Image (spheres, helix red, strand yellow):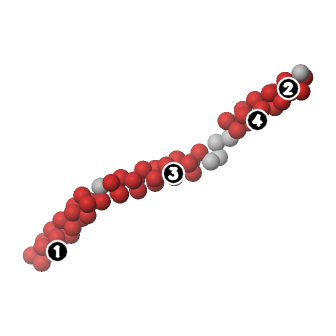
Amino acid sequence: MITIVNAVRKCINTAGRCAKDNKGIGVVELILILVVLIGLVVIFRDQLTSLVNGIFERIVNDSSAV
């Protein structure tokens, strides 16, 4: 019975140390942000392509006027 209590205490102590360790949090947040951005680009690919093409057409037309 004592070994089970010691094992539970050891697990709780290990979980507590892992909860306090924040070294990898920034990397995880960055990866999640990149995944969301890439997903948005894939979802709205056609709209983004038409928007960029329209912007470049305006730039070309306006630059020829100068």
Q: Which residue is mark 2?
A: 4
Which class describes the residues within 10 Å of circle 4: few (<14), some (14-19), or many (20+)?
Answer: few
Q: Which residue is mark 4?
A: 14
Please indicate whether residue 34 sits to the left or right of residue 18 in the image. left
Front in this rendered view, residue 42 or 33: 42
Rendered residue at 51%/52% (across/down): 31
Asked which quadrant contains residue 5, the reply is top right
Disc 2, SS: helix
- Count of picture labels: 4
Q: Position of residue 30 (x, y in %)?
A: 51, 51
Q: Mark 1 or mark 4, which is nearer to you?
A: 4
Q: Position of residue 41 (x, y in %)?
A: 35, 57
Is 28 above or below relative to 15?
below
Sequence order check: which comes first, mark 1 or mark 4? 4
Rendered residue at 16%/74% (across/down): 60
Is 47 above or below relative to 25?
below
Is 10 above or below relative to 23?
above
Rendered residue at 33%/54% (across/down): 43
Q: Position of residue 45 (x, y in %)?
A: 30, 59
CA distance for labels 2 and 3: 40 Å
Which class describes the residues within 10 Å of circle 2: few (<14), some (14-19), or many (20+)?
Answer: few
CA distance for labels 1 and 2: 75 Å
Which class describes the residues within 10 Å of circle 3: few (<14), some (14-19), or many (20+)?
Answer: few
Q: Which residue is mark 1?
A: 60
Please indicate whether residue 48 sits to the left or right of residue 28 in the image. left
Q: Residue furthest right?
A: 2
CA distance for labels 1 and 4: 62 Å
The reply to whether the C-beta atoms of the residues labelled 1 and 4 are less than 8 Å apart is: no
Front in this rendered view, residue 6 or 65: 6
Q: Amino acid at mark 4?
A: Thr
Q: Which residue is mark 3?
A: 30
Is 22 above or below relative to 43?
above
